[in-house]
């Protein structure tokens, strides 16, 4: 038991020596990693800005495209109206042509009747200025008298009818002319109105097309900038991951070197103890010699088994003993209630004791070092929370992968996950916490 205590003390001394080495690495790179993370935050803000611009532009494009479709629909309706109006115009033109023919014929009839009237007036003029009374009194007998009276009446009636007929035809022609002029005026107004509406719609459609072209250009620009920033974010995340992987390797190397130093120290200590036992033994008493060597073998057996017995906890990160934070460490606003074991990404994590898995968190994808909490798992990121009975509990935080689920019974030493840097973690390590 004495030698086990010596080994454990040596391991503790190694951890104390190794921690400053790992810490010095972190301190030297703190400024660089802070700069990288600040740049990543800035790139993320730019990405969000460009994404918002892209979303807003797409909304505007959708609105303008819908408006353009509506305009095209209106233009189509208006074009159909114009076609219908053109049909009406053609019909009216045909009607106007027919009426013009009627007017021309009426004018010819009037000319014929006027010519006939003129001929009669000319004949009367040549016959002299005899009055109707003179014509009647000049009759030879009663029969001739009656004939002359009827002749005078007939000529008068014919002249009156001819004049009335001419006036009627002139009235009809004037009425038709006014109707044609009214129809033409109405048709011209309708045509002008439709043409104006069509020009306005085409002008609005052209303006909307220009706006759409501007929006398309703006959208393409936003997409290009977003792709560029996304590429930069990806590169930045890779650089940050590379930093933490290098940090983990450095810590692992420091831990490995410390283990070699401990082994050498233990070996030298055992050699000195064996030399001391050999020099103090007596050659003449073999029984005493056997008694003195028997405890030494027992001590050797105890040295070979540094893992606690079945009744105690086992180390949760096999083969890795690099402590980057100790229990009770001052964190300014709180004391650290666990130990942090610095280990490379995806290092094996085992259950420290038999127990039942109480809770797990498996949804955190923010598996890189960060200066603030991503909010996942209450800061633990992906974690396993185990209940060992009698009020004893253990928590394994910041895991990359969780292999167990709530309600599952796990035996001591069973692999329950792999280490990482999810949650509120500045770099790869295992947060191991015991609660009682």
Image (cartoon, rainbow, N blue to C red):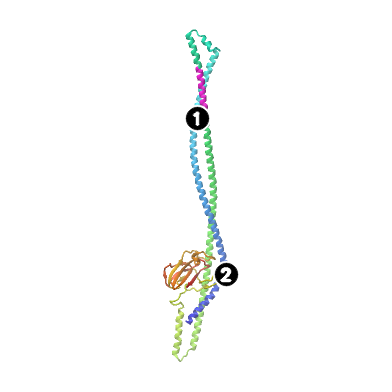
The span picked out in magenta is 157-179
Residue at horizontal 51 percent and vertical 82 percent from the top: 269
Residue at horizontal 45 percent and vertical 88 percent from the top: 289
User: What mark, if any, has residue 97 been given in the picture?
Assistant: 1
| Front residue (pair 13, 391) | 391
Residue at the outermost bottom position: 284
Up the image or down, 347 lies above or below 1; here it is above
| Front residue (pair 372, 69) | 372
Look at the numbered disc 2 and give the secondary structure of its residue.
Answer: helix
In three-dimensional space, the C-alpha distance between marks 2 and 1, rounded to whole angstroms, equals: 102 Å
Q: Position of residue 71 (x, y in %)?
A: 51, 44
Residue at horizontal 52 percent and vertical 19 percent from the top: 115
Residue 430 lies in the magenta-colored region: no
Residue at the disc numbered 2: 28
| Front residue (pair 231, 143) | 143
> Does the image show residue 228?
no
Contact between labelled residues 1 and 2, with CB atoms less than 8 Å apart: no
The dominant secondary structure in magenta is helix
Name which quarter of the figure residue 357 lies in.
bottom left
Residue at horizontal 49 percent and vertical 10 percent from the top: 145
Q: Position of residue 313 (x, y in %)?
A: 46, 75
Q: Position of residue 40 (x, y in %)?
A: 55, 62
Residue at the outermost top position: 140
Q: Position of residue 104 (x, y in %)?
A: 51, 26
Mark 2 closeness class: few <14, some 14–19, many ≥20 residues within 10 Å: few
């Amino acid at each position: 038991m004495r030698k086990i205590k010596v080994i454990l003390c040596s391991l503790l001394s190694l951890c104390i020596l190794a921690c400053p080495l790992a810490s010095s690495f972190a301190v030297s790179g703190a400024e660089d990693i802070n700069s990288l993370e600040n740049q990543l935050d800035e790139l993320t803000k730019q990405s969000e800005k460009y994404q918002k611009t892209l979303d807003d532009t797409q909304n505007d494009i959708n609105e303008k495209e819908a408006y353009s479709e509506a305009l095209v629909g209106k233009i189509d309706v208006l074009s159909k109206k114009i076609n219908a109006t053109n049909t009406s115009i053609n019909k009216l033109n045909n009607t106007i042509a027919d009426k013009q023919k009627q007017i021309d014929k009426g004018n010819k009839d009037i000319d014929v009747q006027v010519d006939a009237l003129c001929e009669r007036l000319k004949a009367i003029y040549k016959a002299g200025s005899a009055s109707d009374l003179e014509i009647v009194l000049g009759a030879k007998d009663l029969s001739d008298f009656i004939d002359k009276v009827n002749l005078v009446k007939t000529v008068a009636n014919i002249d009156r009818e001819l004049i009335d007929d001419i006036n009627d035809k002139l009235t009809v022609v004037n009425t038709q002319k006014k109707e044609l002029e009214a129809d033409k005026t109405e048709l011209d107004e309708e045509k002008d109105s439709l043409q104006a509406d069509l020009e306005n719609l085409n002008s609005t459609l052209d303006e909307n097309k220009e706006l759409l072209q501007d929006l398309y250009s703006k959208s393409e620009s936003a997409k290009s900038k977003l792709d560029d920033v996304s590429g930069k974010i990806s590169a930045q995340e890779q650089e940050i991951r590379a930093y933490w992987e290098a940090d983990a390797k450095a810590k692992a190397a420091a831990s490995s070197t410390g283990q070699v130093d401990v082994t050498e120290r233990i070996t030298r200590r055992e050699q000195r103890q064996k030399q001391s036992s050999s020099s103090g033994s007596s050659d003449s008493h073999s029984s005493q010699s056997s008694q003195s060597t028997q405890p030494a073998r027992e001590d050797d057996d105890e040295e070979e088994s540094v893992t606690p017995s079945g009744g105690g906890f086992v180390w949760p990160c096999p083969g890795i003993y690099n402590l980057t934070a100790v229990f009770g460490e001052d964190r300014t606003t709180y004391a650290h209630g666990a130990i942090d074991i610095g280990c490379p990404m995806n290092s094996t994590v085992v259950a420290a004791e038999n127990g039942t898995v109480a809770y797990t968190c498996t949804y955190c994808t923010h598996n890189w070092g960060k200066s603030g909490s991503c909010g996942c798992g209450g800061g633990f990121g992906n974690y396993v929370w185990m209940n060992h009975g009698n009020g004893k509990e253990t928590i394994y935080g910041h895991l990359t992968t969780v292999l167990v689920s709530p309600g599952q019974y796990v035996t001591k030493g069973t692999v329950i996950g792999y280490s990482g840097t999810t949650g509120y973690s500045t770099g790869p390590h295992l947060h191991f916490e015991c609660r009682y």
